[in-house]
């Protein structure tokens, strides 16, 4: 899985399927359910930490497949495997504003909706109109959820439970001018370059921000910036990032996650909740 995650960490999956279309996804679900094998879905692997022991069962990676984009008036419809960067590029070209907030997020549309990914300028729930999905129990049937049925919260949605798989989504955009769209995108990308270690292998922010606090600032104030375990390090640029300096292991990263949680709890009595998703066993 190290080849399929931006952390560049993780052991073997028993089976990895990269579907080429919706039917492949359906076959994977039917196959796994008939064989009684656990089934997991991932997008671009940019928000997951996979155990050094890998993942038991089938992993279906929906990234760069199902990546068609259609524009109809002010609506933009894209496949779940489409990278956000591609959607932003097409929206900009078509003078459509609404998704600029996501500039620099390395994920797929499906992954981003699942996590309700966002930045200080907005999150996926601000732009999604509806989501077309399939249910693991009835994979031959597609259905549509309106945004208000997706149970969007800060970095959460109904899709996190992994029982409903996103196939495509429609986003509501606004006609705007290309210069303004590009300016917003550049501002975000420059800010990221200044404040985040974007040139290193990581999974972005490790923890959610607790209400009224910044997880990065809290970890920074415990003095943990630069702390290393093996080849994993709490970034000096942004303390809510753990970076892989080379061949870090998932257990090195887990050690730093627990250490940051412990120090912040001891010093500020605040519990940091991971934003990244753990896959496989961490016993
Ligand atoms: N700060 C520190 N030390 C640090 C990091 C941050 O003092 O090591 C301070 C900053 O100076 C600032 C405050 O903490 O005053 C907040 O920092 P920042 O503006 O970097 O935002 P953040 O809350 O840490 C959030 C998102 C990021 C997103 C940025 C920019 C979360 C958990 N994080 O970070 O999302 O890119 O805003 O919009 O919601 C991600 O989800 O992977 C992610 C990186």
Image: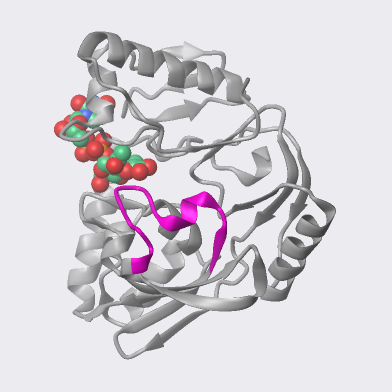
Q: Is residue 93 above or below residue 63?
A: below
Q: Is residue 216 above or below residue 283?
A: below
Location of residue 246 in the rendering, given as x and y in whole percent from the top left corner:
59, 26
Residue at x 64%, y 62% (from the top left corner): 136
Residue sitting at the far right: 35
Q: Is residue 136 left or right of residue 12?
A: left
Seen from the viewer's position, the closer of residues 139 and 205 is 139
Residue at x 30%, y 66% (from the top left corner): 99
Location of residue 227 in the rendering, given as x and y in whole percent from the top left corner:
41, 13
> What is the basis of the colouring in this image?
one colour
Seen from the viewer's position, the closer of residues 30 and 86 is 30
- The answer to which quarter of the image holds residue 5 is top right
Location of residue 245 in the rendering, given as x and y in whole percent from the top left corner:
53, 25
Q: In the image, ligand 1 is in what quadrant?
A: top left
Residue sitting at the far bottom: 73
Seen from the viewer's position, the closer of residues 207 and 246 is 207
- The answer to which quarter of the image holds residue 61 is bottom right
Location of residue 214 in the rendering, given as x and y in whole percent from the top left corner:
22, 31
* In the image, residue 225 lies in the stretch drawn in magenta: no
* In the image, residue 155 lies in the stretch drawn in magenta: yes
Q: Is residue 191 left or right of residue 158?
A: left
**Residue range of the region highlighted in magenta in the rendering:** 149-166
Q: Is residue 173 above or below residue 72?
A: above
Q: Is residue 9 left or right of residue 213?
A: right
């Amino acid at each position: 899985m190290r080849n399929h995650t931006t952390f560049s960490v993780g052991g073997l999956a028993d089976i990895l399927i990269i579907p080429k279309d919706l039917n492949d996804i359906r076959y994977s679900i039917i196959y796994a359910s008939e064989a009684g094998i656990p089934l997991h879905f991932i997008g671009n692997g940019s928000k997951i930490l996979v155990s050094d022991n890998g993942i038991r069962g089938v992993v279906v990676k929906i990234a760069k497949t199902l990546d068609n984009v259609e524009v109809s008036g002010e609506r933009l419809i894209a496949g779940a495997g489409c990278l956000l960067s591609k959607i932003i590029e097409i929206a900009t070209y078509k003078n459509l504003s609404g998704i600029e907030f996501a500039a620099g997020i390395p994920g797929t549309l499906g992954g981003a909706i699942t996590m309700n990914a966002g930045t200080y300028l907005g999150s996926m729930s601000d732009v999604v109109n509806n989501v077309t999905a399939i249910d693991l129990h009835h994979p031959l049937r597609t259905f549509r959820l309106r945004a208000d049925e997706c149970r969007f919260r800060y970095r959460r949605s109904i899709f996190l439970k992994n029982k409903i798989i996103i196939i495509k989504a429609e986003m509501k955009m606004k006609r705007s001018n290309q210069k303004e769209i590009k300016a917003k995108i550049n501002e975000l990308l420059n800010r990221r370059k200044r404040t985040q270690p974007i040139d290193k292998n990581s999974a972005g922010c490790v923890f959610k921000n607790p209400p009224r606090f910044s997880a990065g600032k809290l970890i920074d104030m415990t003095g943990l910036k630069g702390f290393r375990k093996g080849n994993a390090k709490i970034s000096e640029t942004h303390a809510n990032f753990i970076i892989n300096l080379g061949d870090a292991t998932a257990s090195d990263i887990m050690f730093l996650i627990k250490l940051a949680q412990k120090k912040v709890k001891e010093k500020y009595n605040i519990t940091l909740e991971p934003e990244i998703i753990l896959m496989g066993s961490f016993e």
